[in-house]
Amino acid sequence: SFPGIRSFLEDESDALLEYSPGAVDLQEEIVNLRSGIKSREEILEKNLSYIDKTDVAGTLAIEKEVTGLLTEIESMKGRLNKLMVDTRFAYGEISLSFYHHSIPESVPSSFEWINTIDFFSFMQGGIR
């Protein structure tokens, strides 16, 4: 938990309806990715050892398998790198929602000319 987050949110909001801090241990996912990468690299190495012993059709099948394995390995390495960054720098997620979904009646601007523009008409079609 980050000290001060709850008090900051309470100060900035009309009402804090829910506050649910939580943490996720990424170690299990990191271990799973590392072992998955290792096992796929072993399969890749085994497939590459067969390539000299096959005919053209076998070589093409092995090449297709190798391409799939390389794609999978790179994807897993990318996810692993992201997890490592998340664990190193800490990753936080805050979800905010509005209790009332209404537009304020009037919030005048200190620039008088802005007060003369119908914002919604402007957004839909420009100044007329």
Image (cartoon, rainbow, N blue to C red):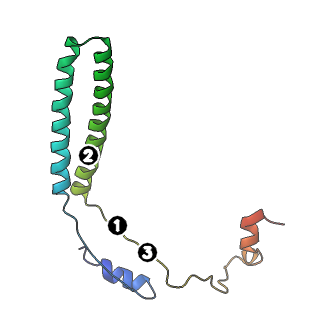
Q: Is residue 116 left or right of residue 75?
A: right
What residue do we see at 78% from left, 77% from top? 116
Q: Are marks 2 and 1 in contact (CB under 8 Å)?
A: no
**Marks 3/2: CA–CA distance:** 28 Å
Q: Which mark is residue 125?
A: none
Q: Which residue is mark 3?
A: 96
Residue at the right extreme?
128
Q: Are marks 1 and 3 in contact (CB under 8 Å)?
A: no
Q: Is residue 37 left or right of residue 102?
A: left
Disc tally is 3
For residue 23, above or below residue 84: below
**Marks 1/3: CA–CA distance:** 10 Å
Quadrant location of residue 6? bottom left
For residue 99, above or below residue 22: below
Where in the figure is residue 25, as x and y percent of width and height? 18, 62
Mark 1, secondary structure of its residue: loop
Query: Callout 3: few (<14), some (14-19), or many (20+) C-alpha neighbours within 10 Å?
Result: few
- Give the quadrant of the N terminus: bottom left
Q: Amino acid at mark 1?
A: Glu
Q: Amino acid at mark 2?
A: Asn
Where in the figure is residue 24, as x and y percent of width and height? 22, 65
Q: Which mark is residue 93?
A: 1
Tell me which numbered mark, 2 or 1, is placed earlier along the sequence.
2
Q: Amino acid at mark 3?
A: Leu
Quadrant location of residue 27? bottom left
Where in the figure is residue 88, as x and y percent of width and height? 21, 55
For residue 109, above or below residue 54: below
Mark 3, secondary structure of its residue: loop
For residue 19, above or below residue 27: below
**Marks 2/1: CA–CA distance:** 19 Å
Q: Which residue is mark 2?
A: 81
